[in-house]
């Protein structure tokens, strides 16, 4: 198998310059993260609070951690001190708790709202017809800065369906961006979409940030760490 370094470099080389790479290191050990770090990667994504807070202190402090998984409100307090960006804000209640914890740490927490465009009913996130209310709510909090949207496409081999999902997200992203132009506190510049299997379609549809795990670190085995 190729090394993490060579896989990472291949992924980086394949991305257009305006697209930011989040290396998704969930379920992989700190040694794997360090290998990617030594090859130059600085942004890493984790999806579980306990795992993030266990790994982060063992790794260089200039790593920029992103939280990409479903975040329970009772885990916000332990996550906020570590993270540059929370991709997966999927409820109004979560917004309130993030604001409170960010305030306690004297920080302004960058977040993305998770938009649900996929076919599956079980996925988290705001529906297209709920997102404007969530944007308005997010903009009320002093210690939250809304940076954009995150989405996941339907998990299917049907690339036209995947493309339709990403186009729906891009349309919502552009429309919200237009409506926020007057708000100087807002830097609405991030559309997080695309994983190992669908990143080319996502980039084609306007993604500015991709979240790649398997293509860099290989398959995940839950018991590995
Ligand atoms: C695990 C995960 C990824 C990475 O998926 P790969 O298919 O391994 O690239 C991206 N986004 C989220 C939200 C994830 O949970």
Image (cartoon, grey):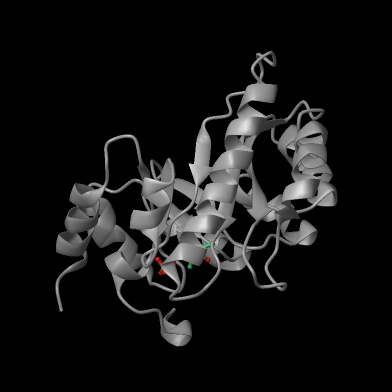
- Return the residue nearer the eye: 30 or 85: 85
Q: Nearer the viewer, residue 25 or 55?
A: 25
Q: Tell me if residue 68 can be seen.
A: yes
Give residue 158's position: percent from left, percent from top. 45, 72
On the picture, is 178 further left or further right than 166? right
> Viewer-proximal residue, 86 or 139?
139
Q: Quadrant of residue 197?
A: bottom left
Is 143 rendered above or below residue 114? Answer: above
**Residue 102 screen position, x and y as percent:** 71, 37
Residue 223, x across and y down, in percent = 47, 86
Q: Quick one: quadrant of the C terminus?
A: bottom left
Q: Position of residue 131 (x, y in %)?
A: 75, 44
Residue at x 79% of width, y 50% of height:
94
- Residue displayed at 75% across by 62% down: 72
Tell me if residue 83 can be seen.
no
Classify residue 220 as left or right of residue 113: left
Quarter of the view holding residue 218 = bottom left
Q: Would you identify the image quadrant in which residue 149 lies? A: top right
- Identify the residue at image location x=58%, y=47%: 169
């Amino acid at each position: 198998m190729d090394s993490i370094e060579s896989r990472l470099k291949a992924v980086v080389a394949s991305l257009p310059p305006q697209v930011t790479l989040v290396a998704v290191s969930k379920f992989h050990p700190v040694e794997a993260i360090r290998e990617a770090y030594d090859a130059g990667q600085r942004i890493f994504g984790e999806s579980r609070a306990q795992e993030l807070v266990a790994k982060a202190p063992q790794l260089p402090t200039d790593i920029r951690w992103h939280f990409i998984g479903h975040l329970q409100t009772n885990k916000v307090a332990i996550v906020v001190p570590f993270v540059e960006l929370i991709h997966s804000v999927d409820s109004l209640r979560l917004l309130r708790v993030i604001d409170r914890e960010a305030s306690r740490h004297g920080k302004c927490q960058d977040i993305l709202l998770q938009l649900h465009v996929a076919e599956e009913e079980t996925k988290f996130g705001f529906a297209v017809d709920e997102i404007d209310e969530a944007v308005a709510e997010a903009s009320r909090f002093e210690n939250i800065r809304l940076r954009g949207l995150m989405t996941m496409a339907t998990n299917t081999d049907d690339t036209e369906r995947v493309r339709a999902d990403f186009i729906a997200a891009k349309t919502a992203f552009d429309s919200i961006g237009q409506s926020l132009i007057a708000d100087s506190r807002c830097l609405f510049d991030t559309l997080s979409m695309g994983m190992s299997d669908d990143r080319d379609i996502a980039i084609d549809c306007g993604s500015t940030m991709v979240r790649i795990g398997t293509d860099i670190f290989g398959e995940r085995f839950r018991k590995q760490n």
